Image (cartoon, rainbow, N blue to C red):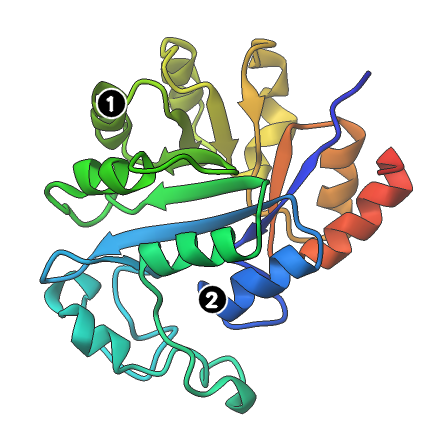
């Protein structure tokens, strides 16, 4: 039986709600997404917060680096109005708040957390994330990913039982390097990589491309039965999966 491709909501239901907010995550789950993807940074006072960029300017009414502001400063920002006035008052959530939401919704899918250490060094973030995620049993599958190979190695040393995935873009040398690593079972490539390098994939690799943004890309991924795909519009992806995979 061929793999049923998991539909993973990229930063939540990003097409219809402000990204990386509790609202976007809740709506993605209610829409039927098989998984959620999000990003974690550390604040100046060491809190784990959920936001994509290293700065807050694009998705809030504030400015400056995430890592140079306290949790209280970040929580005072409006993380919804930039998307639409009706979402005014949405906040930057903490990682713990996202985990609580998943528990409250009895989520049993895939939770992919990207550690954003490829541009800013957050000393100790690996240990903090691992400690929180392994403190209690979870009903859902956790995958930790990063563009930073050193971060993945640190996580593996701390908790070898956790599932890891390497994020990468198009360059061929990244593909060759990954073929030598056996501790990161998941490959999360830029969707542009897939048609060119699919022949290199060993069968044991779990492939989840990002960000699958249009119907052509959706059809390609679903017809090839990749393990999962990251999409901004989980509702559209679910519709195409029913058409192509019948599920």
Asked whether residue 238 is in view, the answer is yes
Q: How far, Cα to Cα, is label 2 from label 1?
A: 29 Å
Q: Which residue is mark 1?
A: 153
Q: Residue at x 18, y 36 (%)?
A: 127
Please give the label number shown on residue 115: none
User: Along the line of sight, which residue is nearer the eye, 117 or 217?
Assistant: 117
Q: In x, y percent, where is residue 2?
A: 79, 19
- Most distant residue in the bottom direction: 85
Q: Answer left or right for 149 relative to 23.
A: left
Q: Residue at x 45, y 67 (%)?
A: 21
Label 2: element kind: helix
Q: Give the mark count.
A: 2
On-image quarter of the N terminus: top right
Q: In x, y percent, where is residue 192?
A: 58, 38
Q: Answer left or right for 58 relative to 239.
A: left
Asked whether residue 64 is in view, the answer is no
Circle 2 Cα neighbour tier, 10 Å, few/some/many (<14 / 14–19 / ≥20) = many
User: Along the line of sight, which residue is nearer the eye, 189 or 67?
Assistant: 67
Q: Is residue 48 above or below residue 113?
A: below
Q: Which residue is mark 2?
A: 22
Label 1: element kind: helix
Q: Residue at x 18, y 77 (%)?
A: 73
User: Which one is in front in this view, the residue at disc 2 or the one at disc 1?
Assistant: 2
Q: In x, y percent, where is residue 139?
A: 51, 38
Q: Answer left or right for 197 relative to 93.
A: right
User: Along the line of sight, which residue is nearer the eye, 22 or 171?
Assistant: 22
Q: Is residue 237 above or below residue 139?
A: below
């Amino acid at each position: 039986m061929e793999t049923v491709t998991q539909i993973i909501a990229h930063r939540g239901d990003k097409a219809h709600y402000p990204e990386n907010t509790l609202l976007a995550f809740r709506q993605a789950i209610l829409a039927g997404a098989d998984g959620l993807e999000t990003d974690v940074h550390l604040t100046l006072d060491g809190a784990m917060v959920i936001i994509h960029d290293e700065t807050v300017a694009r998705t809030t009414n504030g400015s400056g680096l995430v890592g140079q502001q306290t949790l209280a400063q970040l929580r005072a920002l409006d993380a919804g109005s930039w998307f639409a006035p009706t979402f005014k008052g949405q906040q930057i959530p903490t990682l713990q708040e996202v985990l609580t939401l998943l528990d409250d919704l009895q989520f049993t899918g895939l939770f992919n957390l990207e550690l954003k250490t490829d541009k800013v060094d957050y000393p100790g973030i690996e240990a903090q994330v691992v400690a929180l995620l392994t403190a209690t049993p979870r009903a859902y599958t956790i995958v930790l990913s990063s563009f930073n190979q050193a971060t993945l190695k640190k996580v593996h040393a701390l908790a070898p039982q956790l599932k890891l995935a390497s994020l990468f873009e198009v360059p061929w040398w990244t593909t060759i390097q990954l073929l030598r690593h056996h501790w990161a079972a998941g490959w999360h490539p830029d969707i542009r990589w897939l048609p060119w390098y699919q022949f290199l994939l060993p069968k044991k690799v779990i492939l989840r491309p990002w960000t699958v943004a249009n119907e052509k890309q959706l059809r390609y991924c679903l017809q090839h039965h990749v393990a999962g795909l990251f999409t901004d519009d989980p509702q559209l992806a679910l519709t195409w999966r029913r058409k192509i995979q019948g599920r």
